[in-house]
Amino acid sequence: MTSAADQRPILLFDGVCNLCTGSVRFVIRRDPEKRFRFASLQSPVAKALLETDADASTDPLGSIVLIDDDGIWRRSTAALRTAGRLSAPWPLLRVLLIVPRPLRDWVYDFIGARRYRWFGRTDACWVPEQDISDRFLDAGSRSGPVESAETR
């Protein structure tokens, strides 16, 4: 686990979604300074982090969530703010923040609603490899089948 004073951004993701875990692997490979920490949305860690967030109850597994010094970000804004902290050329994607959020989120939701069908899913949350497990806040708390957006 990390120090309570650790203020690095936290990226919460659907741990059974192949697209989501692939996205986390993408971020890890392009984050050489290890700025990001991670947790699956199904974990007790994520539930605790989001317990005061009013938006968390609407669809807790339907979106990636970025928690940073500026607040809690969801959907396309979370993805673009995350890209802005990766190694080049990915920060250039932040320019897409000028696109109105409802339009960006519509595209995000279109893909998100089909992510299990297009990319598949697993029966249990992804467990990271040992060499990156220190970046996962919930690395020791996941085992067995978990609830997913599709099974609710």
Image (cartoon, rainbow, N blue to C red):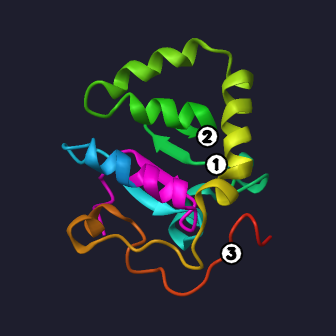
Q: Which residue is mark 3?
A: 147
Q: Nearer the viewer, residue 63 or 150?
A: 150
Circles 1 and 2: CB distance less than 8 Å?
Answer: yes
Q: Which residues are magenta?
A: 1-24
SS at mark 1 in the image: loop
**Between disc 1 and disc 3, whose residue precedes?**
1
Query: Is 62 positioned to the left or the right of 30 in the image?
Result: right
Query: Is 62 positioned to the left or the right of 35 in the image?
Result: right
Indicate the amino acid at tag 1.
Ser
Query: Is 95 positioned to the left or the right of 4 in the image?
Result: right
**Between disc 1 and disc 2, whose residue precedes?**
1
Q: Residue at x 26, y 26 (%)?
A: 88
> Where 28 falls versus 105 (above or below)?
below
> From this viewpoint, is residue 148 visible?
yes
Residue 4 magenta: yes
Give neighbour class at mark 1: few <14, some 14-19, many 20+ (Cα, 10 Å): many
> Where 60 falls versus 42 (above or below)?
above
Q: Which residue is mark 1?
A: 63
| Percent coordinates x, y for residue 54 in the rendering | 73, 48
Q: Which mark is residue 74?
A: 2
